[in-house]
Image (tube, grey):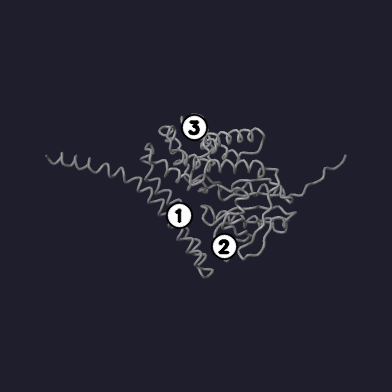
Amino acid sequence: MNRTSRLAALLLMLMPAAVSAAPADADRVLKTYQLALDKWALDVRAAATSDARTKAWSARPDAAAAAKQMWDIISPALPEAWVLEPAAWFLGLTADLRTTLPNGSSSPTFARETAAIHAAIEAHHMQSTKLAPLCLALAANDDPSSLALLEKIQTAHADKKIQGVAALAVAMRLKFLGDDPGLMSKRLTLLRKAIIDSADVEINGVSVAKHAEDELYIIRFLTKGRIAPDLLGADSGNRPLQLSTHKGKVIVLLFWNSGVQEAARVLEMAAAMEKKFAGKPFVVIGVNNDTTANLRELQKQPDLVTFLNFSDPQNRLAQEYRIGTWPLAYVLDGERKIHYAGPPGSFVDITASALLEPTTPVAKP
């Protein structure tokens, strides 16, 4: 065998190993990032001084860097079946990551990568039986093309179970678009389809039936115009805390934890609203599912957690509101009527401002 033939044979021997290494590399990125998050949470909890807590908080693992590592692994292999699981992780990790533009607005940090994943699904995976986790990852993404892709999957997929999961994901996405009767009717139809076709399908340990049950509860009790459930619990110092004691105030009820990607931005938003509406009948109340000890440590950091918080490490209170996506905000009026439910952002501020503006009586002619 000549030198060229030996080299070709060696390359052929190495190719399967190189290809099979990619799923392992993706798994390594996922596990490394999760371990880093766990260590960071322990470091924040262990910090003994204000300076140490500030330093620990600022050292949160970089989600964008982890996403970039994952993208470098999966981008050359988007047509391959194994890529669907890490692609779902990538979409979930990057859903809330945004980049501030020179004009002060923001845009999704990984918009092009997300579009490439969408295109690869349409071109190569529309009939895959492994689309269920990816459907729920798409449901957490507010890119309009995510909804369009989900609707294609739920109408065109050959497997009824995948159709049902996609129907659930579409219903979950639609709840952020409004509460008009047409949307409500469509959501109910989709949830019925999800239950009939896919009730027993489990995604990350939760069945489609349970997801659909939660969505139906949200439609009945947690949509705009409904009176939000009262919450009764305790803060991180075990002092009693109850939502209804703030009757007469506009309440921003904020479900959050230190592990969400945009935790710092969410806390800055809450602090800014407290400052903006100081002196008015307004309050921010958090529901936090970190450990009580971790929440207590976070609250010791100056100017970080500036608002009241229920400590809810067992998710008892979060379950009363059927929280599936973190962070999530509700804006309630003085009678606890819901005026907004959705991601924290400018609409929270706008809704609270509108509720706090004094109404001027119309002058009689």
Q: Amino acid at mark 2?
A: Thr
Badge 1 marks a residue whose secondary structure is loop
User: According to the image, label 1 marks what residue?
Assistant: 62
Badge 2 marks a residue whose secondary structure is helix
The quarter of the displayed image where residue 340 is located = top right
Badge 3 marks a residue whose secondary structure is helix
Q: Are marks 1 and 2 in contact (CB under 8 Å)?
A: no
The quarter of the displayed image where residue 169 is located = top right
Q: Residue at x 57, y 66 (%)?
A: 300
Q: Amino acid at mark 1?
A: Asp
Density class for disc 1 (Cα within 10 Å; few <14, some 14-19, many ≥20) is: few
Residue toward you, 358 or 159: 159
Pick the quarter of the image with the C terminus.
top right
Density class for disc 2 (Cα within 10 Å; few <14, some 14-19, many ≥20) is: some
Q: Mark 3 or 1 closer to N-term?
A: 1
- Give coordinates of residue 269: x percent, y percent: 60, 54
- Give coordinates of residue 237: x percent, y percent: 62, 66
Q: Amino acid at mark 3?
A: Lys
Give the tally of numbered discs: 3
Horizontally, residue 143 falls left or right of residue 21, namely right
How far separated are the C-alphas under marks 1 and 2?
Answer: 24 Å
Nearer mark to the viewer, of 3 and 1: 3
- Give coordinates of residue 28: x percent, y percent: 37, 51
Residue toward you, 35 or 116: 35
Q: Farthest right residue? A: 365
Horizontally, residue 7 falls left or right of residue 341, namely left
Q: Which mark is residue 160?
A: 3
Residue toward you, 180 or 189: 189
User: According to the image, label 2 marks what residue?
Assistant: 292
